[in-house]
Image (tube, rainbow, N blue to C red):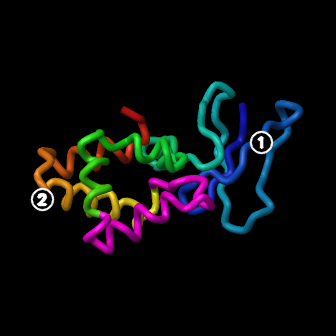
Amino acid sequence: MKTLFVLDGVVIGVGKAAAADVKMSSSIPGAECFEVPDDNLADVGWLIELVDGPQFTAPAAPAPRIGPIAFKMLFTSPERIAAKALRATDPVMEDFWGLLDDPRTSEVDLSLASVQNAIEYTLTVVHAAGVELDVAERKAAILTGIVQ
C-alpha cells in the first residue's frame, strides 16, 4: 500500500512505508491521508473526490508551449497569408504578430488568455477578410498545439 497526502482535494504528496505495520501521517496541517494499493496511478497534482471511497482524477494536461515558428505553423497557409497582409492596417494584428517575430520570443504559451484572445481575434479578422473558416473550430484546433 502507498499513502496519498491530500489537501483541499488535491494530492500533495505520496509516501510508502518501509514496513507494513508503519502508519504514515502528514506534517502539513489539514492534510488527509489515504491508503491506496501500490498500483493506483494517483500522484501529486491529482484531484480526489470522496464518492463511495476516494476517487482520483488525473489533472488536465497543461496547454502546450511551443516555439514561434511552430505556433505560426498551427495556422493554415491562407490564414497566415491573410494575417500577414492585415498587419499593415490592423494595429492589434501588428502588435501580436510583431511579438512573435521578436527574436527574444522563444515560446508561445497556449494557456495564456491573452494568447487565446489573439488567436480568436486573428481568426475573426482573417475570416472577415475572406478566408473561409469556422473560428471556434480553428481556435480549438490551434490550441491543441499540433502542427498541421
Please determine whether, in this image, residue 127 is positioned above or below residue 22: below
Give the residue at x 37% y 47%: 143
Q: CA distance from mark 2 to mark 1?
A: 56 Å
Amino acid identity at mark 2? Ala
**Magenta range:** 87-110
The residue lying toward the viewer, choosing from 132 and 21, is 132
CB atoms of marks 2 and 1 within 8 Å: no
Does the rendering let one see residue 47? no
Q: Secondary structure at mark 2?
A: helix
Q: Quadrant of residue 121?
A: bottom left
Residue 32: in magenta span = no
Please name the residue that numbered disc 2 is placed on.
Answer: 128
Position of the N terminus by quadrant? top right
The location of residue 118, given as percent across then percent down, is 34, 63
Residue 107: in magenta span = yes
Give the residue at x 14% y 57%: 129
Q: Quadrant of residue 117?
A: bottom left
Amino acid identity at mark 1? Gly
Question: Relative to 145, is 33 on the left or the right?
Answer: right
The residue lying toward the viewer, choosing from 5 and 68, is 68
The location of residue 23, given as percent across then percent down, is 80, 44
Please determine whether, in this image, residue 43 is positioned above or below residue 148: below
The location of residue 50, given as percent across then percent down, is 47, 49
CA neighbours of label 2 inside 10 A, class few (<14), some (14 to 19), many (20+)? few
Give the residue at x 65% y 29%: 37
Question: Relative to 111, is 34 on the left or the right?
Answer: right
Please name the residue that numbered disc 1 is placed on.
Answer: 15
Q: Earlier in the sequence, mark 2 or mark 1?
A: 1
